[in-house]
Amino acid sequence: MSSPQIPATSEPLHLHVPEPSARPGQATDFSYLKLSPAGAVDKPPVDVSASQTAPLTGQLIRVLDDNGDAVGPWAADIDDAVLLRAMHAMLKTRAYDARMLIAQRQKKTSFYIQCLGEEAIAVGQTLALRDDDMQFPTYRQQGILVTKEVSLVDMICQVLSNAADPLKGRQLPIMYSYKDYGFFSISGNLTTQYIQAVGWAMASAIKGDTRIATAWVGDGATAEGDFHAALTFAHVYRAPVVLNVVNNQWAISTFQAIAGGENTTFAARGVGYGIPSLRVDGNDLLAVYAASRWAAERARSNLGPTLIEWVTYRAGPHSTSDDPSKYRPADDAQHFPLGDPIDRLKQHLIKRGLWSEQQHDEVRTELDAEVLRALKEAETHGLLGSDNRPGAALMFEDVYKDMPEHLRRQRQQLGV
Ligand SMILES: Cc1ncc(C[n+]2csc(CCOP(=O)(O)OP(=O)(O)O)c2C)c(N)n1
């Protein structure tokens, strides 16, 4: 018998299914982003507690204001040379993406993923780390490799799955692996790298090393169980890891609200696990660099993990297999209130007399030519549909360290 205070009847129950504010043909209401003015958010000491960062997770750390000036406590002193390197790497990443998109359309490769609009995050964080730190990326951090000046020819050979492909044609295009550059093998299975990054960081601490790890995940992929496992382990063992969440608002056709972002932030999650957390303007190179430096310093000082939600916008399609005009307004990226990361750094550099429109155009033209030259060279090693590809015998190697008997038999059956 229920208590007499509880009414016997009530409204029928219903589920809430989050929706984006706009679909094709409409205009997105971006007020859900909860922006803060540039310079408005505090910069706590690196030994801050998780709970002390709780207020920051509902705000947005920004350095560059609308005039292109660097303002507020996060406007760290950054060498001019670092800023110019960042500009160069962002432009090169964009040029690379644009050319690879054309190559896919020309059927030179089967697949490609751009990072259009998100260049500042991977580039800015890489510049804030040491060369020997280890990054555990998703498929949308090619900016790390470009910043580290990995050979474009080598990268393109992977995209073309040709005879010079460093991964011997075994992987989907863009699933790079560069151990020597601190770039962990990309896996198609979302979020697996997140917990692996934490394990790598724990190993570094167990060995008494000084290297730290960075973990990368998208907003959608935070809904995977590995995200929870990673945060738990990182907190428990105070692992030296930077936990990046790139909130580009979309996971293919699903809006970030349905991954759990409605009326909260992904940064707020970190606090619940006991991890100091920040929410940062991902299209503001200076903010990316400053927040990454802060988190890296925490990790290197044995203060443990930091979670950073980068607020940005996936300006391009999810991949070459996707058509975003079917699920979001076509001009959404132009209205995203945090603008474009390259335009914003350009404005800042020009204002400081470090850059000019003319230089910008010249460097862009040079980089387009450099990428095209790299593509042409990579094509000499083969491309999609050509016979110039890794030998079929390679397919059986590296499954195990030593090839077991049954694989040897399968290879013989194939006659290779
Ligand atoms: C475990 C798993 N589930 C589903 C997929 C298919 N999938 C590939 S990318 C993607 C969307 C990921 O979105 P998000 O994490 O927001 O990253 P973004 O692509 O926006 O950078 C999905 C669902 C997958 N690769 N792995």
Image (spheres, rainbow, N blue to C red):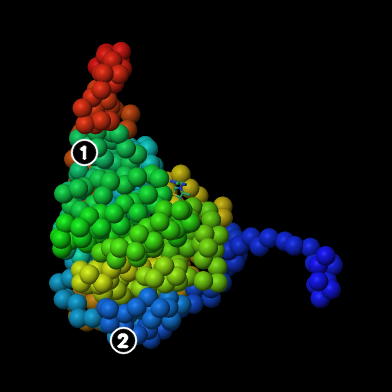
The residues tagged by marks 1 and 2 sit, at their Cα atoms, a distance apart of 45 Å
Relative placement, left or right, of 374 versus 73 is left
Secondary structure beneath label 2? loop
Say whether residue 280 is visible: no
- Quarter holding the C terminus is top left
- Taking depth in this image into account, of 410 and 114 the one nearest to the observer is 410
Asked whether mark 1 and ligand 1 are closer than 8 Å, the reply comes as: no
Taking the spot 83% from the left edge, 65% from the top edge, the residue there is 1
Taking the spot 35% from the left edge, 45% from the top edge, the residue there is 187
On the image, which quarter does residue 88 sit in? bottom left
Residue 166's label in the rendered image is 1
Relative placement, left or right, of 295 versus 50 is left
- Taking depth in this image into account, of 119 and 386 the one nearest to the observer is 119
User: Dot 1, how many residues are within 10 Å of its Cα: few (below 14), some (14-19), or many (20+)?
Assistant: some
Asked whether mark 2 and ligand 1 are closer than 8 Å, the reply comes as: no
In the rendering, at what x and y percent does residue 205 appear? Answer: 20, 60
Secondary structure beneath label 1? loop
Q: Is residue 123 above or below residue 53?
A: above
Q: Is residue 375 above or below residue 132?
A: above
On the image, which quarter does residue 247 sit in? bottom left
Q: Amino acid at mark 1?
A: Pro
In the rendering, at what x and y percent does residue 144 appear? Answer: 25, 57
Q: Is residue 72 above or below residue 387?
A: below
Q: Amino acid at mark 2?
A: Gly
- Identify the residue position indicated by label 2 in the image: 72
